[in-house]
Image: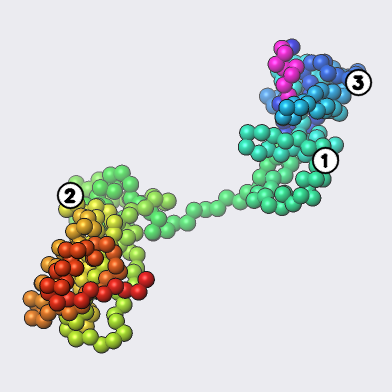
Amino acid sequence: MSSLCSSTWVLDSGATNHMAAGDKGLTVRMAGSGAEVTLANGKAEPVKRHNHVSMDVGKGKTKTRMVLGESMLVPDLTSNLLSVRALYRTCGAVLFVGNACYILSDGDAVHSSGVLDKASVVGKVNDLAQYVLKVTPVKALACAASTRIAGEVGLWHRCFNHLGSEKFKLAGTMVDGMPLSVADAKRVIGTVCVPCVGETMLQAPSPRSSTVTTKCELVHTDIGGPLTESLGGSLYFMTALEDSTGFITATPIETKGMAPEVLKTSIKQLETLTCVKVKRVRHDGAKEYVTNNLKSWYENNGITSEMTAP
């Protein structure tokens, strides 16, 4: 037997008794009863003796004496096995935390501490002396907002302006060149087509002011995004809403820094359409709306800049 085997014990939650591969440390030696133990590989090995094993175990910088009862001498083992279940039968406890295991001689202290009550899941010992979790499989739910059409189907999905998979069979009868695998495509559960999800999301409309306004008296503006990059490279959009009529424009922009110039253009277009000067512009106070250049433009055009309440 190697020195490593004699000095190392492996914790085994399936072993019914402590098993030693050699006789080092055996303090009480009783002849074997002719019994055999069945190992994990199904091989039966004879029990040579029943013993108590006494050993010194490291505990930080100190050592403590540990005596294992109900131990068996099984010379054909490659490792000494420390039975977790045997420790429990002697009122002990074993805790596994991080990269360390902790063996307590007083298992009742663990129960009384209340730490076990905080466990998320509890397993039980089955008839094969194995610690198992009894679970109930849950069938995944098909959800339109959490599906994506993948692979070659995904290309056709985008080419047809994000056509739903249930429409592919009809489209296959109307166009040439669509593979049969695409026409019969099904959704892939658990994945997402981001543009489709974004398109179906609902957003409350911008609230009108509580007071009655005249044409072009008040314009609301805001920036949305970032979104999926458009073919033109835009990630954001800027809106301008005329309060009295609800007329709104949405302009795609590549960066938020483009918002001031786009806002100027939108206001000029609105004034041209209505032949009325814009008097007030209301925004959320984002830095793009309070630049020195835009402040000067507001003053030169007689426009009052207002910020919404935080």
The type of residue carrying mark 3 is Val
Find residue 281 and report its image quarter: bottom left
* Residue hosting label 2: 176
Viewer-nearest of discs 3 and 1: 1
Q: CA distance from mark 1 to mark 2?
A: 77 Å
Say whether residue 222 is magenta: no
* Residue hosting label 1: 106
Residue located at (34% from left, 65% from top) = 201
Viewer-nearest of discs 1 and 2: 1
Q: CA distance from mark 3 to mark 2?
A: 87 Å
* Residue hosting label 3: 28
Element class at badge 1: loop
Which of marks 2 and 3 precedes in the sequence?
Answer: 3
If the image is split into quadrants, where does the N terminus sit?
A: top right
Element class at badge 3: strand
The type of residue carrying mark 2 is Asp
Find residue 160 and report its image quarter: bottom left
Say whether residue 5 is magenta: yes
Which of marks 1 and 3 precedes in the sequence?
Answer: 3
